[in-house]
Amino acid sequence: MPRPASLDCVRCGARYPIEHFDRDCPACRNAGTPANLTVGYDGIVGAGIDREHLPRKPAGLWRWGDFLPDLEPVTLGEGATSLLHTPKLGLGEVWVKDESRNPTWSFKDRLATGAISWASRIGATTIASSSSGNAGAAAAAYAASAGIPCIVFTFQGASGVMVTQMRAYGAMLVVVAEKSDRWKLQTAGVRELGWYPTSPFFGPVVGSNPFGIEGYKTIAYEIAEDFAWDVPDWCVLPVCYGDALYGMWKGFEELRRLGWIKRTPRFVAAEVAGSLEAALSAGAAMPADQPRNEPTLATSIGASQGTVQSLDVLRRSNGAAVAIGNDDLIRWAHKLARDEGIWGEPSSVAPFAAIERLRAAGTIKAGERVVALLTASGLKDAGPIEETLPAPPLIEPNLPALLRSLHNVYGYKP
Ligand SMILES: Cc1ncc(COP(=O)(O)O)c(C=O)c1O
Ligand SMILES: [Zn+2]
């Protein structure tokens, strides 16, 4: 296992001590382009490993320990998720990397295992997260497994199964009236009391905990191995702060430098606000805040401003960003569930709308192979889909009544 030696700015490459995990790059912040840090190692990760004889154990994410910080993992068996070919979607050669199969039913478990394993190593006494969604649920579960108290800041009106999940795992949930006050309180806890942050907690946001983002590299390793090292042409992700986007890109780059793969896939950010799309076409150094007019159904990726780490990956991989609206989210959530038997959270299906658009524009060419990252289960946010489904009929218990209702409600003909 490689030893983390520094935290390096994703933008300017400046190196900071390993204790700097709760801050961003001061130089880039002063220059008006705040940027996250990423773990630097004391050597080349994966060097000396034979890709044909990778360890089979431990099963899951920590099987890639030779590419991750040398830690005693806090693990719930995350990773090793399925790659499913989905030819019936009519989008050409598309595979779904189904991250809903993780222990808390989202890809955030990869972030949580990385971040909380490091928290455990440094003897953190309290985990702190500002999230009403998948990140908070994952932090709560892994903190429980590590035996470290976890505080989650949420805002008035936040509800649903993910908030229930956090409470079930024993996290101490606190509610503030103003969303922005969550960061104020978390900052005070981190700076004054030494709490360990897993989520962003100051703005403009640069991304999450760098040790957590290391966990996302394993999505790239798993895809590369499943494609027998002949990697897909495109990877398409639902993007908010771009933690997974950056982590996956870094993972592929590491494999490329080892000579295990010939090239890194091109990346697409399926976003809600359109701030990355605008920054790419304007050639901007930093995505601008882009408030939306209509409330999005993709609440997990609802931020109005993208990050420098996302923009960098899209540029370096010659990728693209596509803004997705509610009608497309509903349409693709239905289609994926009905045609392929895969039910994703509304945010998670944004990549399919992006692929459809880029295929139509000729950006993704016929025959090019695409992987879509399905980041979380449909059960995480069932409401928007439920509202669009027909109510099941209450019927008289006889065959003619049954057939009549099946026909009237569902269009069924025996
Ligand atoms: C289901 C889902 N998809 C995608 C994202 C975007 O994550 P990232 O910040 O890595 O871009 C989130 C983030 O909260 C999420 O919950
Ligand atoms: Zn920098």
Image (cartoon, rainbow, N blue to C red):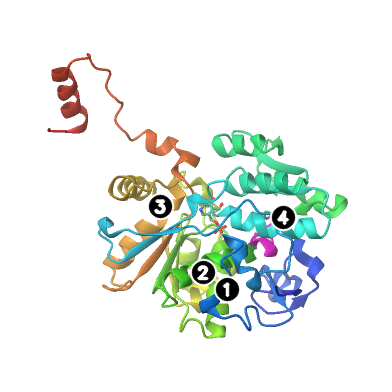
Q: CA distance from mark 2 to mark 4?
A: 21 Å
Residue 66 lies within the magenta run: no
Label 1, residues with CA under 10 Å away: few <14, some 14-19, many ≥20:
many
- Count of marks overlaid on the render: 4
**SS of the residue under disc 4:** helix
User: Which label's residue is closer to the chain start, 1 or 4?
Assistant: 4
Please report whichever mark, 2 or 1, sits nearer to the chain's N-terminal start: 2
- Tell us which disc is closer to us: 1 or 4: 4
Magenta highlight range:
200-212
Q: Which residue is mark 2?
A: 220
Above or below for 120 versus 165: below
Which secondary structure class fits the magenta region best? loop
Task: Identify the residue position indicated by label 1 in the image.
Answer: 250
Which of disc 3 and disc 4 is earlier in sequence? 4
**Of tags 2 and 1, which is closer to the observer?**
2
Q: Quadrant of the N terminus?
A: bottom right
Across and down, in percent, residue 132 comes to 61, 42
Residue type, label 3: Val
Q: Percent position (x, y) of residue 283?
A: 50, 75
Asked if one can make out residue 362 in the rendered structure from this viewpoint, the answer is yes
Which tag, 3 or 1, sits closer to the chain's start?
Answer: 1
Ligand 2 falls in quadrant:
bottom right
Q: Residue at x 32, y 47 (%)?
A: 331
- The answer to whether mark 2 is within 8 Å of ligand 1 is no
Q: CA distance from mark 3 to mark 2?
A: 19 Å
Is 139 situated left or right of 298 in this image?
right
